[in-house]
Image: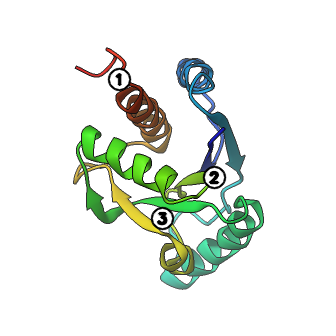
Amino acid sequence: MFEITLIAMGKLKEKFYQSAAAEYEKRLKGYCKFQILELPEVRLPDDPSPAEISAGLEKEAETILAKLPKNCWLCVFTPEGKILSSEDFAGKLKDVKLSGKSSACFLIGSSFGISPRIKEKADFQLSMGRMTFPHHLARIMVLEQIYRAEAIQAGSKYHK
């Protein structure tokens, strides 16, 4: 069975986000082996310098690299990434499965972004659009889109 991992920097604190995440996690397990890994964000001062941000992102990169599934297809969510429709996203994920990869990993970085080193390692950079979303809401949106992609591939009526 194909494996999908979502790595998210930071923990969900609000119950309604936790509940939504749990629901999508439950639904996804009907299509694939699925897991969410919450990794700690590096704590930075209230007004960090560019050097402090860069150092923090590099520390987070070490943690991320240690948790990436071996030989996975890596997709990072970043503002400069490609914008896809839900159908195109489903097609991209299908292509990954047909390529012989046995797993995909999606990464949502911290509030300061993702280390350039991780972006370079990524197989694909995906954008959620030009709007800015809170990280907790972005996680739910990513979970929903992964679920929608799986439902589209399965021919489910979920996607209309």
Q: Which x, y percent locates residue 137? A: 44, 35
Contact (Cβ within 8 Å) of mark 3 with mark 2: no
Question: In the picture shown, does residue 7 fall above or below 87?
Answer: below
The Cα atoms of the two marked residues, 3 and 2, are separated by 27 Å
Residue at the far bottom in the pictured view: 51
Horizontal relation, residue 77 to residue 109: left or right: left
Q: Which mark is residue 113?
A: 3
Q: What is the crowding at mark 2: few (fewer than 14 residues within 10 Å), some, or many (at least 20)?
A: some
Q: If you read the primary sequence from the N terminus, does the residue marked by circle 1 or circle 2 appear first?
A: 2
Read off the residue under disc 2: 102
Q: Label 3 amino acid?
A: Gly
Q: Which x, y percent locates residue 42? A: 68, 63
Q: Which x, y percent locates residue 136? A: 50, 37
Horizontal relation, residue 141 to residue 84: left or right: right
Q: Residue at x 39, y 33 (%)?
A: 153
Read off the residue under disc 1: 155
Quadrant the C terminus occupies? top left
